[in-house]
Amino acid sequence: MIKDSTLEGFLEDLASKSPTPGGGSAAAVIGAMGAALVSMVANLTMGKKGYESVSKDMEMLQIRSDKYRKQFIDMIQDDVDVFNGVMAAYKMPKESALEKQARDDAIQAALKKATDVPLDCAILCMDVIELTRQAAEKGNQNVISDAGVAVLAAEAAMGSAALNVYINLANITDKAFVDDRRQRLEAVLAASGELTEMVYTLVKSKV
Amino acid sequence: MIKDSTLEGFLEDLASKSPTPGGGSAAAVIGAMGAALVSMVANLTMGKKGYESVSKDMEMLQIRSDKYRKQFIDMIQDDVDVFNGVMAAYKMPKESALEKQARDDAIQAALKKATDVPLDCAILCMDVIELTRQAAEKGNQNVISDAGVAVLAAEAAMGSAALNVYINLANITDKAFVDDRRQRLEAVLAASGELTEMVYTLVKSKV
């Protein structure tokens, strides 16, 4: 499992000529870092003097950001698994017409799975961006820069996941599926840009 | 050493109530991921059919991105070490006037070190962003989305490092130092925004 690699080993594997782990897993790792930093801000705010009035909010924030971090960690591996599924489908025999049809069907099914993992990643990034807003507004001033790093990480992870959605959609022939996933992705992307800018500007005004 | 943590363990430490590793180390990890993805694109382009004319460029690209990745990995730990230096200085005795002076001097010296690690990180991110341009322009079409993830990672790492520079500068009394570091940081930030946009747009047009 990739999550059990050392940090240095993971970075080496990312750099290597093996196509996995690649950008899709990287997006999930960066998203997980955003969620982790929200948890850190919550952890270093709850119960601290001067932050009594937001302690309950911070507890809720931490429960959610911990959950999201774990979901991102699953996606690091999922992205590799669905990529391998696509590769396996492309390697199926294509001698007879029957084989060709079976292979095409398998490729299309695998590409749909390979689209939905980064799409779920992008949606989860949106959830994290919403949490960073609370972290930036109510979090401990001493760790306010960490809320800013969290929002930048979540935004970069979202843009990265988006590229992985687009690259898979480009080869999918089911137009209804393509339109549906593209629409969902673009709704999330449109909603995130302004919020990210707002959170980053708020953090910058506080550091 | 943080680089020897498992990926999952690092994310847990990031989320925990311990202030280190925090956003500064996260910035270095994200920067390292950007550099690693440039190496991956170079690795999967050199020697490939149809990319003979850019093989030499990709070799040079990989040498540089591998070097930058290693420099980022050092910064993951350096950021923790300089933060601990600041904490240690704040804990120095402050009974007598002499003690107070020694403590103030130690705090100021530690804050300067804690500024220069993320500033170096931001400058290195600029170097990576320049490499992502080559990866996006000349890299293998099959891994072009990875060049896009690389530029988003490097840009997010830069913005994150910048917050860590600002938060330390806010407590430094040496005006010449503050002006110098702020000027250097802002030059790098100004140069990166447009280039990142350009590289991401190029990648998006290719996926």
Image (cartoon, coloured by chain):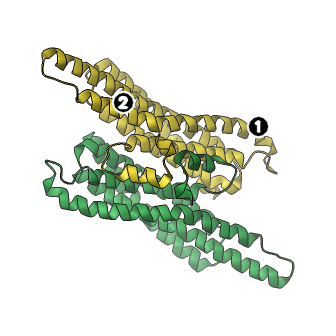
Chain colours: A yellow, B green
Instruction: Report in which chain the residue with disc 1 lies.
Output: A
Q: Residue at 36%, 58% (x, y): give it.
A: B129
Residue depicted at x 26% and y 49%? B44
Q: Residue A44, which numbered label?
A: none
Residue at the extreme right of the image, as rendered: B95
Q: Which sits in the foreground, A15 or B200?
A: A15
**Mark 1 or 2: the one toward you:** 2
The disc at residue A114 is: 2
Rendered location of residue A155, percent (x, y) = 48, 44
Task: Count up the numbered dots.
Answer: 2
Q: Mark 1 points at which residue?
A: A56
Residue, far bottom: B98
Along the line of sight, which residue is nearer the eye, A26 or B2?
A: B2
Q: Give the quadrant of residue A184.
A: top left
- Is A114 drawn above or below residue A76 in the view shown? above
State yes or no: discs 1 and 2 in contact (Cβ < 8 Å): no
Q: Which subunit holds the residue at mark 2?
A: A
Lower sequence index among marks 1 and 2: 1
* B62 and A190: which is toward the camera: B62
Label 1 – label 2 distance at C-alpha: 38 Å
**In this image, A6 relative to A89: left or right?**
right
Badge 1: how crowded within 10 Å, few (<14), some, or many (20+)? some
What secondary structure is found at the residue carrying circle 1? Answer: helix
- Residue found 49% across the figure and 38% down from its top: A192
Q: Residue at x 25, y 42 (%)?
A: B142
Residue B61 placement (x, y as % from top left): 28, 61
Identify residue type, mark 2: Ala
Q: Which residue lies furthest to the top in this view?
A: A98
Residue A7 appears in view: yes
In the depicted structure, whether residue A111 falls above or below residue A195: above
Could you tell me residue A25's position as x and y percent?
42, 41
Q: In which quarter of the image is the C terminus of chain B?
A: top left
